[in-house]
């Protein structure tokens, strides 16, 4: 149980006592299957994998506030059943100079949630803020990498292309939020090039493009207490953030010690934002 005590300005009298009790049960089930085929050539491999994850979050939160001449209470319940299917196909082929890595990955994720607000005595909980919502995620992707190394040079050139479809279905009777979603097809290249000046010094340059997608909890519409005065609500309109990163590095070894200098620059687009809403209850 979490308890917050609120006093008047001179600390001589209690103004409010806020109590928060959380009862949570989490259940996780996982199943994995992997297959590997080794060709006659050393390092020539084919890997196929499948992973299934089920995660249930059964959470009950009880709230109670005690004032000088009255009290109020209430609770809310959350039930969330997450199912994730992951499939990967990876192929590695050694070449005369370097090696080739390629494959595909597929993720199908489904998270139905149901939130119920149950008011008690003098409760201010809004029963219409609850209901059901379902998060759906489909991500197929293909990738390829070429890796090369000799006495003077190291190089890696890769490209991943992914299609993403996110759909967040909201109870049509919800008083604030509506169903939303997005989809895109984007390339994500990466480059690593290093020159070995000698055995103790190496100069490197890196470039990659990444994506930071909002998590399901970042867009979940149901309000949830993080503290007596802080309530957190997701935003279904959040969109991914794309980052282009360039790094320049220099590595040197001197008297059995290693020194690494990095110069990094990031170019970010479509910034992902998260908001915490502060509120003060007025009696």
Image (cartoon, helix red, strand yellow):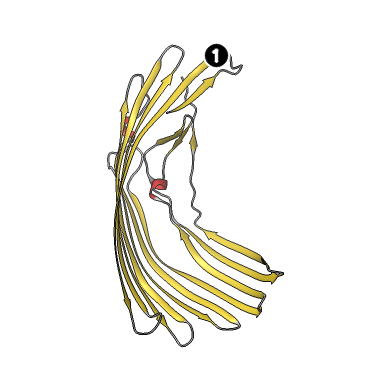
> Looking at this rendering, what residue extends furthest in the front direction?
256
Question: For the residue labelled by badge 1, is the local secondary structure a helix, a strand or a loop?
Answer: loop
> Looking at this rendering, what residue extends furthest in the bottom direction?
96
Q: Is residue 25 left or right of residue 241?
A: left
Counting from the top left corner in percent of width and height, residue 117 is at 32, 31
Counting from the top left corner in percent of width and height, residue 77 is at 31, 34
Counting from the top left corner in percent of width and height, residue 1 is at 42, 28
Q: Nearest the camera: 244 or 191?
A: 191
Tell me which corner region of the image, top left, top right, bottom left or bottom right, holds residue 114: top left
Tell me which corner region of the image, top left, top right, bottom left or bottom right, holds residue 12: top right
Q: Give the residue at x 47% y 74%.
A: 158
Q: Nearest the camera: 29 or 159?
A: 29
> Looking at this rendering, what residue extends furthest in the right direction?
255
Q: Is residue 203 left or right of residue 223?
A: right
Counting from the top left corner in percent of width and height, residue 269 is at 52, 59
Tell me which corner region of the image, top left, top right, bottom left or bottom right, holds residue 35: bottom left
Q: Give the residue at x 48% y 52%.
A: 272
Residue occupied by mark 1: 13
Q: In the rendered view, would you say 136 is above or below 8?
A: below
Q: Give the residue at x 34% y 25%.
A: 74
Q: In the rendered view, would you say 90 is above or below 109?
A: below
């Amino acid at each position: 149980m979490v308890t917050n005590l609120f006093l008047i300005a001179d600390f001589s009298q209690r103004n409010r006592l806020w109590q928060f009790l959380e009862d949570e049960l989490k259940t996780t089930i996982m199943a994995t299957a992997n297959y590997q085929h080794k060709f006659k050539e050393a390092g020539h491999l084919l890997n196929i994998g499948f992973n299934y994850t089920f995660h249930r979050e059964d959470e009950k939160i009880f709230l109670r506030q005690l004032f000088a001449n009255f009290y109020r209470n209430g609770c809310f319940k959350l039930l969330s059943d997450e199912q994730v299917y992951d499939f990967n196909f990876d192929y590695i082929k050694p070449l005369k100079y370097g090696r080739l890595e390629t494959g595909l990955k597929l993720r199908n994720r489904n998270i139905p949630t149901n939130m119920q607000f149950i008011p008690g005595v003098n409760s201010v909980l809004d029963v219409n803020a609850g209901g059901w919502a379902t998060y759906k995620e489909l991500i197929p992707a293909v990738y390829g990498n070429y890796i090369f190394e000799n006495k003077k040079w190291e190089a890696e050139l890769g490209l991943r292309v992914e299609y993403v479809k996110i759909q967040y279905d909201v109870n049509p009777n919800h008083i604030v939020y509506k169903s939303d979603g997005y989809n895109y097809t984007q390339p994500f290249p990466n480059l690593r090039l290093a020159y070995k000046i000698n055995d103790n010094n190496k100069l490197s340059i890196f470039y990659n493009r990444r994506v930071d997608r909002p998590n399901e909890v970042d867009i979940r519409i149901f309000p949830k207490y993080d503290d007596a005065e802080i309530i957190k609500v997701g935003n279904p309109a959040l969109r991914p953030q794309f980052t282009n990163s360039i790094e320049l590095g220099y590595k040197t070894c001197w008297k059995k010690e290693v020194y690494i200098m990095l110069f990094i620059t990031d170019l970010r687009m479509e910034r992902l934002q998260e908001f915490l809403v502060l509120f003060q209850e007025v009696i």
